[in-house]
Amino acid sequence: MKFFKYIMVGFLFGFGAYKLEMISFFRIYEMFHFQDFHMYGIIITGITFGIIITQLFKLGFVKTSKGEQKIFNPKAHTWPRYIIGGIIFGMGWALTGVCSGMMFVLMGSGYTVFGVFIAAAMLGTFVYGMVRKHIPH
């Protein structure tokens, strides 16, 4: 029961993503051909909410579920980590056609082949943890 609230948030996100057609190949196809604003609207809305919620946490208006104030650690402004990480993420997105969160939505909507992709993503995360000390951050 400890993780029930996280499961419910994930379920609501997945249901919303499915109903908004975020996992539709045709919506993604339209996005990359600049034929429709649908996916751009979803992405811009997500970024906007992310910026607002992060600023509310930083200003102390919002606290964690345990009542603690979230402290953001400053990150080094190094370009290689963003470029290499972005390329690896983009290659995974190009190979599977979805980002990591949408793999769970597709698995839940009946496309069981995405269980293989989820296992591969978890393996990649495990390998990243093993080589993390040897790559630029």
Image (cartoon, grey):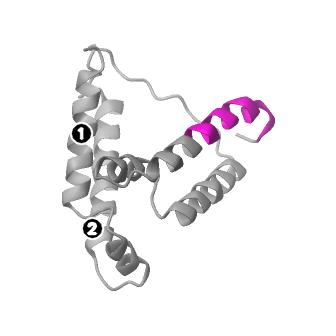
- Residue under circle 1? 11
> Is 134 contained in the magenta span?
yes
Q: Position of residue 19 (x, y in %)?
A: 18, 58
Q: Amino acid at mark 2?
A: Gly
Relative height, residue 15 to residue 32 (above, below): above
Q: Residues within 10 Å of mark 1 (few under 14, many from 20)?
A: some
Amino acid at the residue labelled 1: Phe
At mark 1, the secondary structure is helix
Picture coordinates of residue 118, whole percent (x, y): 49, 44
Residue depth check, mark 1 versus mark 2: number of the one nearer the observer: 1
Could you say which disc has been placed on residue 41 in the image?
2
Residue at left 46%, top 55%? Answer: 99
- What secondary structure is the magenta-colored segment mainly? helix
Q: Residue at x 56, y 38 (%)?
A: 122
120 or 137: nearer the viewer = 120
- 79 w.r.t. 5: above or below: below
Does the stretch in magenta take in 40? no
Please report the bounds of the magenta region as a residue range.
122-135
Q: Position of residue 64 (x, y in %)?
A: 29, 21
Which quarter of the rendering shows the N terminus? top left
Disc 1 or 2, which lies upstream in sequence?
1
